[in-house]
Amino acid sequence: MNNCKICDKQIDDHRYHLGYTECVDCSDEEKYSAHQVYPHKTGGYVQPIKKSQSDNLKRLDRRSVGGSGKPAKGIMKDNSWDRWLKQYQEKIDNPKPTRKVVWKTPKVIYLSMSKAESMIREYYDNWGYQPTLDYCKELYLDDKISMVMKNQLTNMITDQQMLPKRLRKWVQKIT
């Protein structure tokens, strides 16, 4: 009673109750496959789809486990392990000569501290506090004085500037 329409073989009862009238061998219905869908980080679900759609979705999905459509990378792509090993051995056997870098520091001749101090004091008397600080910085940038000398001279001028005017004039007369 449950016979195939094409080959007249007996159809399984479960298949017949699902509405199929052809046996598995004669059926042209494509077998269903599954695709894992992740709408969020977790909580994926399985979606039944046709086999042709499954292959395409596996190719597009970044979480897919099917590696048949993805190209290999690096050494495995073109089977170049032997070539890489050969080049590595050549580098070990024939190393490139290394160049020796010699750093030459320029010789800088600074002004003496007494000369720089007299220049700064004279500039301070003529132009005032802020222009003298700028002049001191300029001497440093032109490599005429060192950073330590610049700091000492700046401190000297700042100390003198912080004195009251009467004492400042008196200190200028003494020095």
Image (tube, rainbow, N blue to C red):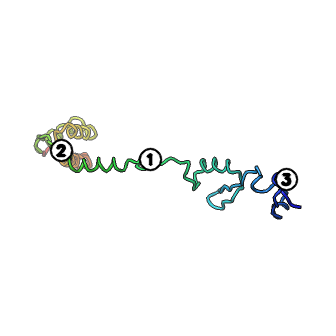
| Residue at the (17%, 38%) spot, across then down | 122
Badge 1 marks a residue whose secondary structure is loop
Q: CA distance from mark 3 to mark 2?
A: 83 Å
Q: Which mark is residue 77?
A: 1
Tell me the quadrant of the picture where the N terminus can be found.
Answer: bottom right
Q: Which residue is mark 3?
A: 5
| Residue at the (26%, 37%) spot, across then down | 131
Q: Which mark is residue 171?
A: none
**Which image quadrant for residue 137?**
top left
Q: Depth check: 112 or 48 in front?
A: 48
Q: Nearer the viewer, mark 1 or mark 2?
A: 1
Outermost residue, front side: 8
Query: Residue 88 in the image: x percent, y percent?
Result: 28, 49
| Residue at the (33%, 47%) spot, across then down | 83
Q: Depth check: 76 or 122 in front?
A: 76
Query: Residue 119 in the image: x percent, y percent?
Result: 15, 38
Badge 3 marks a residue whose secondary structure is loop
Q: Nearer the viewer, mark 3 or mark 2?
A: 3
